[in-house]
C-alpha cells in the first residue's frame, strides 16, 4: 500500500478504529496531556483507557536525547461510572512493569480489576507506568495498520521503507541515540515514579491513603526499593520517603523486596548460549556496559517489536495463514530467533531443517506457538492461551526436555512442551484453540498429554489485542542495562544516601499473587505476607488472564486486587 493510500485510509478511518486515539483532553496544565483511546476489549464500555504524558525533564548530565524523552507516560484505566479526577477515586493501583515490558501489558488485569472493584461498590484506578526508554519506540506502523485493517501497512513501514503520514521508519536506535540510557538506572527509575506521583497527586496525605504500589516481575523488585528509598537523602524528613507514597503493596508473580532477582547463569551449561542468554538477561545476570540490553537474537529491539506484529496479525485476521511469517525479513537475528523459540529439537535448531518458516499455520497459531506455555521455552515469557490443533504434534525437546528436574527450576515453566510435526505441506494447516476451547471436540487426540482446561486461563484473542492495541505497547524495545546492574548493587555504598528505610515494605499491607507456572522467586520479607497461589497461571497470565475461568469462577488476580483495595 502506497503512502498516499495510507494517509487517505488513516484520514477516513472510523472513530472506532482501535489504536487511533481521540483528541487530547483539555488541561489547565500545559505540561500534561491525557488522550483517551478506543479498544475492542470486552470491558471497553465499562472502563475508560487513556494515555497520560507529563513533562519531567531528565537531569542535564544525562546527555543529548530526543525531546519526547523528557516526558513521563503511563496508561490510566478508570470506571466509566466513576469520578473523572484521580484524587476522587477510592484507591489507585500504580504498577511498575517487568523486564522488556511496557505499560500495555497491564491492559487486561487493569480493566478486570476496575470492574471487579465496581461490583464491590468502589471506584479504583489502575495506572501502568512506562519507563523512559520507551520514548525511543516507533509505534506508527502498528497504529496505522489498526486503522487500515491491513497488516501490510505495518510491515511495509517497518521492513520496506514505506511512508506513513510523510514519515519513514528510522530503524532501531543504536550508538549515540541510546547512550543517554546509561544514566537511566534504578535511581532515575525510582525518581521518575516519585515525580509522577507528586505531579498527578500533589497532596501527600492522599498518596499515603489511596495509592497502592506494586508491579509485575522485575517491577516488584523495583517497588521494593521504592518503599525503602529516601528521595531527599534526609532520614529525618519522611514526607519524601518511598513508603509514604503508598498505602500498600501488590506483587504480580514477583516479590516486593529490595534486592536483585537471583541470577541463574550456569545452571544449564549444556544449553546453547543463544538460548541461555535470555534467561540470564531476565534475571539480571547480564549487565555489561551497553546502554541497552540487547542480544544477537531472541531479545533485542527488532524481536520485541515482532511480538507486537505477531499480535497485530492475529488481531486483524485470526484465521489467516502465515501472514506475518511470509513478510518477515531474512536476517540472522530473525532467523535465529525463530529457531530458538520454535525448533522442536537440537538438530532443527542447529541446521534449520526443517525450516520454521515452512510451517503452515494460522496467525493465532503462530502467536500461540511463540508465547504459549506448551511451546515458548522461557518461563518469563509464557502465558496459558490454549493449544494447537489441526495436525499432529510431538514432544518439543529444545532447548531442554520437560523432565521433572527441568520443570522444578522454574526457568522454563511447568507445562510439557509440544511442537508441530509437519512442515512444508500446504494441505496441512495448524490452527489454535482458545483457552476455553481446550478439551473440546476440535482437540487433538493427545492434547491431554500436554494440557487441560484447568491450566488454560488467557484468551489468545485478548492477548493479540493487548500486544497491538494500547498506545503504550506491551513490550519494551530498549530495556536499559543500567537497571538490572543497579538492582544487583542496590545495597552498595553508591546508594547509601537514599536506600535507608530498610523496613519500608513492612510498614503497609501487602498482597502477593504467584502462578504455579511462574518464575522462581525469593521469599517475601514482609511478616504478614501469605502469597496467593494461582493454579494454572504462568508468568504472563497474572496480567493477561480472561475475566472468567474455565470452571466458571471469576478471574482471581483482579478479584484479589479489588478486595485488597477495600482494606
Image (spheres, rainbow, N blue to C red):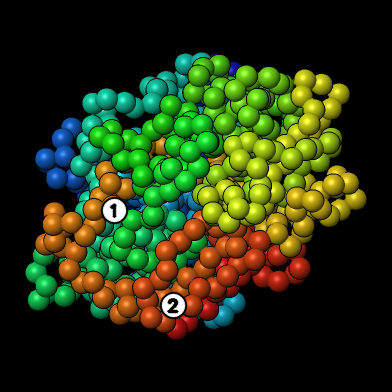
Distance from Cα at disc 1 to Cα at disc 2: 22 Å
Looking at the image, which is closer to me, 318 or 530?
A: 530
Q: Which SS class for mark 2?
A: loop
**Dot 1 and dot 2 residues touching (CB under 8 Å):** no
Residues packed near mark 2 inside 10 Å, few (<14), some (14 to 19) or many (20 plus): some
Residue 77 screen position, x and y as percent: 47, 60
Residue 303 vertical position relative to residue 441 in the rendered view, above or below: above
Residue 308 vertical position relative to residue 302 in the rendered view, above or below: below
At x 18%, y 32%, the residue is 64
Residues packed near mark 1 inside 10 Å, few (<14), some (14 to 19) or many (20 plus): many
Where is mark 1, residue-wise? 487
Q: Quadrant of residue 216?
A: bottom left
In the image, taking residue 346 as reference, residue 294 lies left or right, namely: left
User: Which circle marks residue 123 in the picture?
Assistant: none
Answer whether residue 418 is visible to the viewer in this image. yes
User: Which circle marks residue 529 in the picture?
Assistant: 2
Residue 119 screen position, x and y as percent: 59, 77
Residue 148 screen position, x and y as percent: 60, 31
Q: Quadrant of residue 429?
A: top right
At x 47%, y 82%, the residue is 566
Q: Quadrant of the C terminus?
A: bottom left
Q: Quadrant of residue 349?
A: top right
Of the two numbered discs 1 and 2 on the same chain, state the one appearing first in sequence: 1
Looking at the image, which is closer to me, 327 or 145?
A: 327
Residue 6 screen position, x and y as percent: 54, 23
Amino acid at each position: 500500500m502506497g503512502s498516499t493510500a495510507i494517509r487517505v485510509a488513516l484520514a477516513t478511518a472510523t472513530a472506532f478504529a482501535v489504536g487511533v486515539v481521540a483528541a487530547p483532553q483539555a488541561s489547565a496544565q500545559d505540561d500534561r496531556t491525557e488522550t483517551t483511546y478506543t479498544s475492542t476489549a470486552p470491558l471497553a464500555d465499562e472502563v475508560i483507557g487513556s494515555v497520560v504524558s507529563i513533562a519531567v525533564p531528565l537531569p542535564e548530565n544525562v546527555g543529548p536525547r530526543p525531546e519526547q524523552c523528557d516526558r513521563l507516560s503511563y496508561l490510566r484505566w478508570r470506571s466509566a461510572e466513576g469520578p473523572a479526577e484521580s484524587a476522587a477515586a477510592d484507591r489507585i493501583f500504580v504498577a511498575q512493569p517487568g523486564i522488556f515490558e511496557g505499560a500495555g501489558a497491564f491492559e487486561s488485569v487493569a480493566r478486570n480489576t476496575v470492574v471487579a472493584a465496581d461490583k464491590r461498590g468502589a471506584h479504583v484506578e489502575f495506572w501502568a507506568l512506562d519507563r523512559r526508554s520507551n520514548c525511543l519506540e516507533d509505534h506508527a506502523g502498528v497504529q496505522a495498520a489498526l486503522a487500515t485493517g491491513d497488516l501490510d501497512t505495518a510491515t511495509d513501514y517497518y521492513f520496506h521503507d514505506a511512508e506513513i503520514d510523510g514519515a519513514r521508519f528510522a530503524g532501531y536506535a543504536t550508538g549515540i541515540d541510546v547512550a543517554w540510557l546509561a544514566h537511566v538506572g534504578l535511581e532515575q527509575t525510582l525518581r521518575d515514579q516519585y515525580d509522577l506521583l507528586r505531579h498527578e497527586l500533589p497532596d501527600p496525605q492522599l498518596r499515603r491513603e489511596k495509592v497502592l504500589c506494586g508491579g509485575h516481575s522485575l517491577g516488584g523488585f523495583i517497588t521494593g526499593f521504592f518503599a525503602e528509598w529516601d528521595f531527599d537523602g534526609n532520614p529525618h524528613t519522611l514526607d519524601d520517603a518511598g513508603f509514604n507514597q503508598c498505602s500498600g503493596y501488590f506483587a504480580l508473580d514477583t516479590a516486593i523486596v529490595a534486592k536483585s532477582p537471583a541470577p541463574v547463569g550456569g545452571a544449564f551449561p549444556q544449553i546453547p548460549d543463544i538460548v541461555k542468554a535470555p534467561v540470564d538477561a531476565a534475571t539480571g545476570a547480564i549487565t555489561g556496559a551497553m546502554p541497552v540490553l540487547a542480544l544477537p537474537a531472541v531479545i533485542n529491539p527488532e524481536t520485541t517489536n515482532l511480538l507486537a506484529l505477531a499480535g497485530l496479525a492475529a488481531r486483524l485476521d485470526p484465521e489467516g495463514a502465515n501472514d506475518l511469517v511470509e513478510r518477515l525479513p531474512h536476517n540472522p537475528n530473525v532467523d535465529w530467533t525463530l529457531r530458538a523459540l520454535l525448533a522442536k529439537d537440537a538438530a532443527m535448531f542447529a541446521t534449520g531443517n526443517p525450516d520454521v518458516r515452512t510451517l503452515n499455520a494460522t496467525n493465532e497459531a503462530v502467536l500461540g506457538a511463540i508465547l504459549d506455555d506448551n511451546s515458548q521455552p522461557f518461563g518469563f515469557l509464557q502465558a496459558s492461551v490454549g493449544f494447537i490443533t489441526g495436525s499432529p504434534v510431538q514432544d518439543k525437546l529444545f532447548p531442554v526436555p520437560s523432565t521433572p528436574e527441568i520443570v522444578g527450576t522454574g526457568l522454563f515453566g511447568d507445562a510439557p512442551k509440544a511442537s508441530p510435526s509437519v512442515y512444508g505441506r500446504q494441505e496441512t494447516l495448524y490452527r489454535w484453540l482458545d483457552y476455553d476451547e481446550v478439551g473440546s471436540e476440535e482437540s487433538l487426540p493427545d492434547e491431554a498429554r500436554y494440557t487441560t482446561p484447568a491450566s488454560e486461563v488467557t484468551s489468545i484473542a485478548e492477548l493479540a489485542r493487548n500486544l497491538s492495541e494500547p498506545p503504550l505497547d506491551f513490550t519494551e524495545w530498549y530495556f536499559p542495562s543500567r537497571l538490572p546492574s543497579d538492582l544487583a548493587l542496590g545495597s552498595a555504598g553508591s546508594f547509601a544516601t537514599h536506600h535507608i528505610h530498610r523496613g519500608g515494605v513492612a510498614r503497609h499491607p501487602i498482597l502477593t499473587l504467584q502462578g504455579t507456572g511462574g518464575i522462581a522467586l525469593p521469599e517475601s520479607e514482609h511478616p504478614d505476607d501469605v502469597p496467593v497461589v494461582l493454579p494454572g497461571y504462568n508468568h504472563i497470565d497474572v496480567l493477561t488472564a480472561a475475566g472468567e475461568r474455565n470452571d466458571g469462577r471469576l478471574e482471581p488476580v483482579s478479584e484479589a486486587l479489588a478486595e485488597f483495595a477495600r482494606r
